[in-house]
Image (tube, helix red, strand yellow):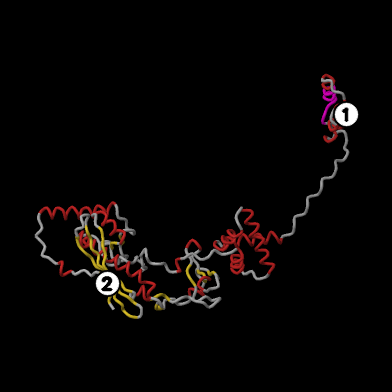
Amino acid sequence: MNQNMSLVNYSAQAHIPTPSTRDDLKAIKANFGLIQTAMNEVLKKGVHYGVIPGTGSKAKPTLLKPGADVICALFHMAPAYEYQITDLGSGHREYLAHCSMADVSGRVLGQGVGLASTMETKYRYRKGGITCPRCGQPTIFKSTQDKGGGWFCWSKKGGCGTQFEADDQEIIGQQADERIEHDNPADYYNTCLKMAAKRAQVSAVLTITGASALFTQDMEDRDFKGDVIDAEFESEPEDMAPPPPTLDELMAELAKKAGLSSDEEKADLAAFIDESAKASKKEPLYTAASGIKFFERFQTAFAKWLKNKSAPAAPEPPAESPAQEAGPESAQDEPDITPETLKAIEAELRRLGVAPNQLPPDLVSVLEHFTNQIT
């Protein structure tokens, strides 16, 4: 079944072009120079265009959709689309898009064509899932780099939530290259429609502006590692961040890496993490995660902590014995105040009119102490 949506009749619009004049040649030369200037000053590699690795430095870059949008704005062109949808059976569809470019007056400058189908490999198949060694479900996904780059069993997809190291042989030893056909092609209808429109737009831009001398369209819908680039394309679960781990999960993983199995060993680990967190003024969750990430450093610090914990306590220093009476030559028996000083204090008190019973008790005790020493 074909669903035609205002298909363009190219034969009806065909005409014999009139010969170009010298002014036309000047305009073409100016337009080409404008595109070259835009490529050097506006368009960015990896954003508006890209170069396929291995094709050599002389290979033409691929014009991407953002680059096509910039050139459309540069030449004041507005795209308009018409589609033809073909049912391929078993839920699959093919989308044929025609893109017409018009100037500000509405005059059609040219057209491009693009095709996309749910039968294309990237839309028809997916890679076989990796089975979780713990729960047996095919729900193992790759963590993002900021989460350590390991693997996790996605609980929202029916998994158990277990996390695995990036080099865990139980995970990477499995073969995940087997292709499995998607059970619902309709999930990619919108993606294929947008992809057909994008291909048609890039085709029209290259044709109308003569930019095909600078760019190609060979891989405008892919990045240069073979993955799809499309704003409308929903990312696979591998690109999603895993749920944040709890402290208990991190402690369990840390104990496993350190080979701690007994309750006493795990209690020591918990005490070490708690003390380390307090010393660094960090949360225990952060400290445990750092221990996993920098495991060798953690092992060294934990071993040192255990050694200090098991070492016998240092003996208490002996208490200082009270000062023994010594001979007159001992410095300890020398008074801290001379008779002259004491007389000066008493004279000053009399001058101030302060009676002995008006002095604070502590000061009286001090004066009596030194008086006894002198006498």
Q: Is residue 255 above or below residue 93?
A: above
Q: Is residue 275 above or below residue 189?
A: above
In the picture, the disc for residue 341 is none
Q: In this figure, which residue is indicated by the disc labeled 2? A: 84
Helix, strand or loop for disc 1: helix
Outermost top residue: 351
In the picture, the disc for residue 371 is 1
Residue 172, image x, y percentages: 48, 73
Which of 191 and 319 lies nearest the eye of the viewer? 191
- Indicate whether residue 341 is drawn in magenta: yes
- Indicate whether residue 111 is drawn in magenta: no
Residue 280, image x, y percentages: 61, 53
Q: Residue at x 66, y 66 (%)?
A: 266
Q: Residue 178 is drawn in which quadrant?
A: bottom left
Q: Residues within 10 Å of mark 2 (few under 14, many from 20)?
A: some
- Say left or right for 67 vs 164: left
User: What is the magenta range?
Assistant: 336-346
Q: Residue 305 is drawn in which quadrant?
A: bottom right
Residue 347, image x, y percentages: 84, 20
- Say left or right for 126 vs 14: right
Q: Residue at x 24, y 69 (%)?
A: 6
Q: Amino acid at mark 1?
A: Thr
Q: Residues within 10 Å of mark 1 (few under 14, many from 20)?
A: some
Q: Amino acid at mark 2?
A: Gln
Q: Earlier in the sequence, mark 2 or mark 1?
A: 2
**Main SS class of the magenta portion in the image:** helix
